């Protein structure tokens, strides 16, 4: 998150800590990405930013793959 504005980074961390990490099912606040290459990934919306993640059920682990502005985050292949 080094390239993000510090204020944006704080909002994203706060969202992950307060809204996602406390849930038994982190999918309840996210949305599945569509497409064969993206089918395993989920997105979370924080203002104009998107958190692209892979949810690992066995340990209820959320691996953040990419964070970026919604205009740019989907352009590169994951």
Image (cartoon, rainbow, N blue to C red):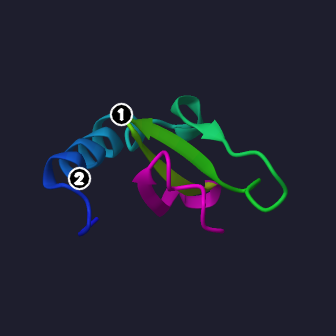
User: Residue pushed farthest right?
Assistant: 36
Q: Is residue 64 magenta?
A: yes
Q: Is residue 76 left or right of residue 71?
A: right
Circles 2 and 1, Cβ within 8 Å, touching? The answer is no
Quarter of the image where one finds residue 45: top left
Mark 2 nearby-residue class (10 Å; few <14, some 14–19, many ≥20): some
Which range is magenta?
Answer: 57-78
Q: Is residue 10 above or below residue 24?
A: below
Q: Which residue is mark 2?
A: 9
Q: Which residue is mark 1?
A: 47
Give the number of callouts.
2
Q: Residue at x 56, y 37 (%)?
A: 25
| Residue 36, horizontal then vertical, whole percent | 84, 57
Which label sits on residue 2? none
Q: Is residue 50 above or below residue 30?
A: below
Q: Is residue 23 left or right of residue 3?
A: right
Q: Is residue 58 magenta?
A: yes
Camera sees residue 78: no
Quarter of the image where one finds residue 27: top right
Secondary structure at numbered mark 2: helix
Q: Quadrant of the N terminus?
A: bottom left
Mark 1 nearby-residue class (10 Å; few <14, some 14–19, many ≥20): few
Distance from the alpha carbon under mark 2 to that under mark 1: 12 Å
Q: Is residue 56 above or below residue 29?
A: below
Quarter of the image where one finds residue 23: top left
| Residue 42, horizontal then vertical, whole percent | 61, 47
């Amino acid at each position: 998150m080094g390239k993000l504005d510090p204020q944006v980074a704080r909002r994203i961390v706060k969202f992950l800590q307060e809204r996602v990490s406390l849930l038994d099912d982190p999918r309840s606040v996210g949305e599945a990405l569509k497409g064969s290459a993206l089918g395993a990934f989920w997105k979370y919306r924080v203002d104009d930013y998107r958190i692209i993640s892979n949810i690992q059920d066995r340990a209820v682990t959320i691996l953040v793959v990419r964070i970026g502005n919604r205009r740019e985050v989907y352009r590169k292949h994951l």
